[in-house]
Every structure is written in C-alpha cells, then in structure tokens.
Image (tube, grey):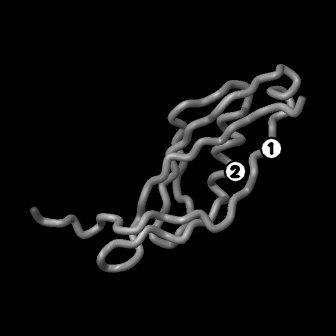
C-alpha cells in the first residue's frame, strides 16, 4: 500500500502549556468537569485551530480553547520533516475544596 506523504511517524510533543483561567461565573456556580478539544497543530508546532468536541457551560469551553491556542508543540514528523497534526486535548476543571 502507498504511504501518504503527510503521515505522521512521530506525534507532536507538548513543549509548553498555559493553564486556563477558571471563569468566575463557573466558579461561583460550582461547575466542574472536562472539556475535550481537538487541537490542530501546524508544521511549525503552533496550535492553529481548536475545536470543542465536548464542552462545558459558563465560559469553561472558551477558557480551555483559549489556553490551548497558546500551547507550543514540537511538531509531528513525517518522512519529509515536520507535518501538521491533530491532538485530542482534555482540560479538567475542578474547584479546590
């Protein structure tokens, strides 16, 4: 079978991350849970797009997506060098007891 030229042989590796800010409204309402995102990582290692796969109310989805947009990756590598890739990212929001 023919290999696709953009197939990632090595996945992207997270180099630096920014933690999301817990939105005040969600904190006051006691909303906790996990936001699941699809991060599109460019061949330069920057997060180029973020889609919410499973969100939470009161600004939590937006806060998670905003943080992940600022993450930096070592890009995935294919046969010819760095290639774009996707990662599923889970951001867990929990309130300190």
The Cα–Cα distance between marks 2 and 1, rounded to whole angstroms, is 8 Å
Residue at the image position 54 percent from the left and 71 percent from the top: 74
Question: Where residue 21 is drawn, which disc sits there?
Answer: 1
Quarter location, residue 64: top right
Residue at the image position 77 percent from the left and 33 percent from the top: 94
Q: Position of residue 91 (x, y in %)?
A: 65, 41
Residue at the image position 68 percent from the left and 25 percent from the top: 57
> Label 2 belongs to which residue?
67
Q: Position of residue 17 (x, y in %)?
A: 69, 59
Residue at the limit of the structure toward the top, as seen here? 29
Looking at the image, tell me whether mark 2 or mark 1 is earlier in sequence order: 1
Q: Decide which of 1, 26 is in the foreground and name it.
A: 1
- Look at the picture and state if 73 lies above or below 97: below
Quarter location, residue 59: top right
Are there few (<14), some (14-19), or many (20+) residues within 10 Å of tag 1?
some
The quarter in which the N terminus is drawn is bottom left
Residue at the limit of the structure toward the front, as seen here? 97
Residues tagged 2 and 1 counted as in contact (Cβ below 8 A): yes
Q: Is label 2 in a helix, a strand or a loop?
A: helix
Residue at the image position 80 percent from the left and 44 percent from the top: 21
Residue at the limit of the structure toward the bottom, as seen here? 80
- Look at the picture and state if 37 lies above or below 18: above
Q: Position of residue 93 (x, y in %)?
A: 74, 35
- Look at the picture and state if 91 lies above or below 5: above
Question: Where residue 96 is drawn, which disc sits there?
Answer: none
The quarter in which the C terminus is drawn is top right
Are there few (<14), some (14-19), or many (20+) residues within 10 Å of tag 2?
some
- Look at the picture and state if 81 lies above or below 83: below
- Residue 55 lies left or right of residue 80; in this view the side is right
Q: Is label 1 in a helix, a strand or a loop?
A: loop
Q: Position of residue 90 (x, y in %)?
A: 59, 42
Count of marks placed on residues: 2
């Amino acid at each position: 079978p023919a290999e696709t030229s953009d197939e990632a042989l090595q996945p992207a590796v997270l180099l630096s991350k920014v933690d999301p800010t817990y939105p005040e409204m969600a904190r006051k309402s006691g909303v906790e849970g996990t936001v699941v995102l699809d991060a599109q990582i460019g061949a330069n290692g920057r997060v180029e797009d973020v889609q919410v796969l499973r969100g939470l109310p009161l600004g939590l989805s937006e806060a998670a997506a905003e943080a992940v947009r600022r993450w930096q990756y070592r890009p995935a590598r294919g046969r010819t060098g760095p290639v774009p890739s996707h990662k599923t990212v889970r951001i867990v929001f929990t309130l300190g007891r």
